Amino acid sequence: MNQPITGYHQDEHGDWVADLACGHGQHVRHQPPMTNRPWVLTEAGRRQHLGEMLNCKKCEEEPSK
């Protein structure tokens, strides 16, 4: 289920996690060549991606209410 990014925080290892509108988090790592997200390395880059939609796997796993 697609959810907009509302903010970011770093996990215990210093990796960036996108905070999603649903309340879940999703890692947004820059690990070339598998994942190319250089924007996550700067505050301006992260700010530019606020509101971008990410697929929340946790929402998809939750049973329908």
Image: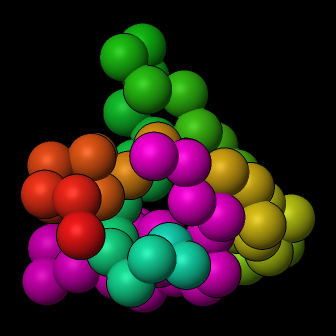
Give the camera-side residue of 35 and 6.
6
Q: Nearer the viewer, residue 5 or 49?
A: 5
Residue at the image point whose x is 45% and y is 46% from the top: 1
Q: Residue at x 76, y 70 (%)?
A: 50
For residue 10, which quarter of the picture? bottom left
What span is colored magenta in the figure? 1-19
Question: Where 58 falls versus 25 (above or below)?
Answer: above
Residue at image x 13%, y 57%? 63
**Image position of 18 with respect to 10: above or below:** above
Instruction: Point out the image quarter for the C terminus.
Output: bottom left
What is the x, y in percent for residue 58? 22, 57
Inspect this view and state whether residue 40 appears.
no
Question: Magenta stretch: dominant SS?
Answer: strand
Q: Quick one: which residue is furthest to the top in this view?
A: 33
Residue 1 in view (yes/no): yes
Q: Position of residue 20 (x, y in %)?
A: 50, 73
Q: Which percent across, then down, holds residue 53?
A: 66, 51
